[in-house]
Amino acid sequence: MNTFFIILVACCFSCLIRAWLGKSVPDRMVAIDILGILAVGMTAMLAVMTDRDFLIDVALCWVFLSFIGTLALAKYLAHKTLDE
């Protein structure tokens, strides 16, 4: 389990580098979206490792907020309003 956690942290750092050095806004958006997915994975692994069930609820809320944020940013980049 600790090895997987270290691998997820390394992937998070690579996503942060990609978000920092991204050439365009969609590149940065994808990097931040993947970073959110990795953070949810780390939260779920932490819930399993520590036997704390509320962390699964935190992970689910994080997934929903990340999805809504991705949709809103995609609409913004497409120059559309949120009600279209």
Image (spheres, rainbow, N blue to C red):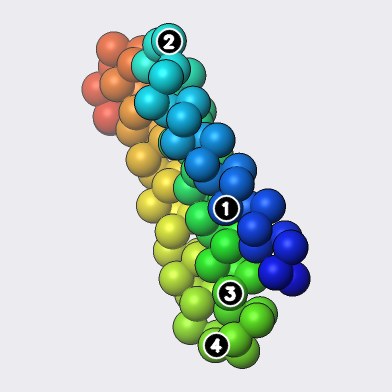
Q: Number of marks in the image? A: 4
SS of the residue under disc 1: helix
Which comes sooner in the sequence, label 4 or label 2?
2
Alpha carbon separation for disc pair 1 and 4: 20 Å
- Report the residue at 48% width, 47% height from top: 36
In the image, residue 14 above or below residue 67 = above
Q: Is residue 59 left or right of residue 70?
A: right
**For residue 71, what is the image quadrant?**
top left
Crowdedness of circle 1 by 10 Å Cα count: few (<14), some, many (20+)?
A: some
SS of the residue under disc 4: loop
Alpha carbon separation for disc pair 3 and 4: 8 Å
Is disc 4 in contact with disc 2, using a CB cutoff of under 8 Å? no
Which comes sooner in the sequence, label 3 or label 4?
3
Alpha carbon separation for disc pair 1 and 3: 12 Å
Is disc 3 in contact with disc 4, using a CB cutoff of under 8 Å? yes
Residue type at mark 3: give it: Leu
Residue type at mark 2: give it: Lys
Which comes sooner in the sequence, label 2 or label 3?
2
Measured as percent of width and height from the top left, residue 57 is found at 48, 74
- Report the residue at 33% width, 33% height from top: 72
Which comes sooner in the sequence, label 1 or label 3?
1
Task: Name the foreground residue: 14 vs 40.
Answer: 14
Residue, disc 1: 9
Is disc 2 in contact with disc 3, using a CB cutoff of under 8 Å? no
Residue, disc 4: 52
Residue, disc 2: 23
Quadrant containing the C terminus is top left
Crowdedness of circle 4 by 10 Å Cα count: few (<14), some, many (20+)?
A: few
Residue type at mark 4: give it: Arg
Q: Which mark is residue 46?
A: 3
